[in-house]
């Protein structure tokens, strides 16, 4: 179902699946556990967070990674501000986003807060210790135009085989260039082409155990 012109999805239980790319928005096993393992764990969060810390996300989707980060910062007592900039080409309709996030009742407070803020536009919005900005449009245009830096990056586009534009070497090179010295990146993908592109962009790349049925994931760091 599509509401308000949002990205078209179909449902596999509680999980939205993109009709455009034929890929689920998060793990069929446990999307929240996946977010914590891949994106928080892969970037050393919330331990590395501090006032002024900057997070960049490629593929906002349902907002699950953002809310998992927000909840982790709150549990850690981090007052922020932590600046969270997310890039999304095809935003979900509010009703579909709410339906997807309803699968994670422990994030219900954060989901309500997010819904109210995004109804007012892309931000920046104060979301507890986070300051969220949602940038819509093709990342091949919006990311090069972004002049910020990131201390941590979440690379969470649809699978490389299904959404190759998100994983092209030139775009990954721009993403790597947006990392501050010592900045990190994490992605669920362990595809060789992705790792090679990140290495070619000057990052130190490491393969780690993946989440659930995925044997491996990738983390990277700018020296």
Image (spheres, rainbow, N blue to C red):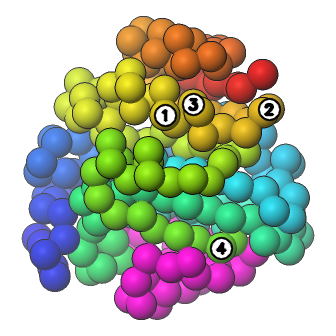
Q: Nearer the viewer, residue 216 or 132?
A: 132
Q: Nearer the viewer, residue 104 or 173?
A: 173
Residue indicated by mark 3: 176
Estimate how packed mark 3 is, as few (under 14), some (14 to 19) or many (20 or more) residues with alpha carbons within 10 Å.
many
Residues under labels 4 and 2: Cα distance? 22 Å
Residues under labels 2 and 1: Cα distance? 16 Å
Residue indicated by mark 2: 182
The range drawn in magenta is 100-129
Residue 157 location (% of width, % of height):
37, 41
Residues under labels 3 and 1: Cα distance? 5 Å
Estimate how packed mark 1 is, as few (under 14), some (14 to 19) or many (20 or more) residues with alpha carbons within 10 Å.
some
Helix, strand or loop at label 4? It is strand
Residues under labels 4 and 1: Cα distance? 23 Å
Estimate how packed mark 4 is, as few (under 14), some (14 to 19) or many (20 or more) residues with alpha carbons within 10 Å.
many
Name the residue rendered at 65%, 82% in the picture.
Answer: 126
Q: Considering only vertical position in the picture, is 174 above or below 7? A: above
- The quarter in which the N terminus is drawn is bottom left
Question: Which of the marked residues, 2 or 3, is nearer the chain's N terminus?
Answer: 3
* Whether label 4 touches label 3, CB < 8 Å: no
Residue indicated by mark 4: 131
Residues under labels 2 and 3: Cα distance? 11 Å
Q: Quadrant of residue 14?
A: bottom left
Q: Considering only vertical position in the picture, is 25 above or below 95? A: above
Question: Which of the marked residues, 2 or 1, is nearer the chain's N terminus?
Answer: 1
Question: Which of the marked residues, 4 or 2, is nearer the chain's N terminus?
Answer: 4
Residue 123 visible (yes or no): yes
Residues under labels 4 and 3: Cα distance? 22 Å
* 160 sits left or right of 42 in the view: left
Residue indicated by mark 1: 174
Residue 216, magenta (yes or no): no
């Amino acid at each position: 179902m599509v509401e308000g012109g949002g990205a078209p999805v179909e449902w596999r239980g509680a999980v939205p699946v993109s009709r455009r790319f034929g890929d689920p928005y998060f793990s069929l096993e446990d999307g929240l556990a996946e977010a914590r393992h891949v994106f928080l764990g892969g970037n050393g969060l919330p331990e590395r967070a501090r006032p002024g810390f900057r997070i960049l996300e490629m593929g906002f989707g349902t907002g699950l990674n953002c809310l998992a980060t927000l909840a982790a910062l709150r549990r850690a007592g981090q007052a922020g501000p932590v600046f969270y900039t997310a890039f999304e080409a095809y935003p979900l309709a509010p009703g579909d986003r709410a339906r997807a996030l309803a699968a994670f009742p422990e994030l219900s407070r954060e989901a309500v807060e997010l819904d109210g803020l995004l109804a007012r536009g892309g931000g920046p919005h104060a979301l507890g210790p986070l300051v969220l900005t949602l940038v819509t449009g093709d990342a091949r245009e919006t990311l090069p135009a972004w002049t910020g830096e990131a201390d941590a990056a979440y690379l969470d586009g649809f699978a490389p085989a299904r959404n190759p534009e998100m994983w092209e070497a030139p775009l990954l090179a721009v993403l790597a260039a947006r990392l501050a010295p010592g900045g990190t990146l994490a992605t669920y993908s362990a595809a060789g082409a992705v790792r090679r592109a990140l290495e070619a962009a000057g990052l130190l790349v490491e393969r780690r155990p993946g989440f659930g049925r995925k044997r491996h994931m990738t983390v990277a760091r700018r020296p």
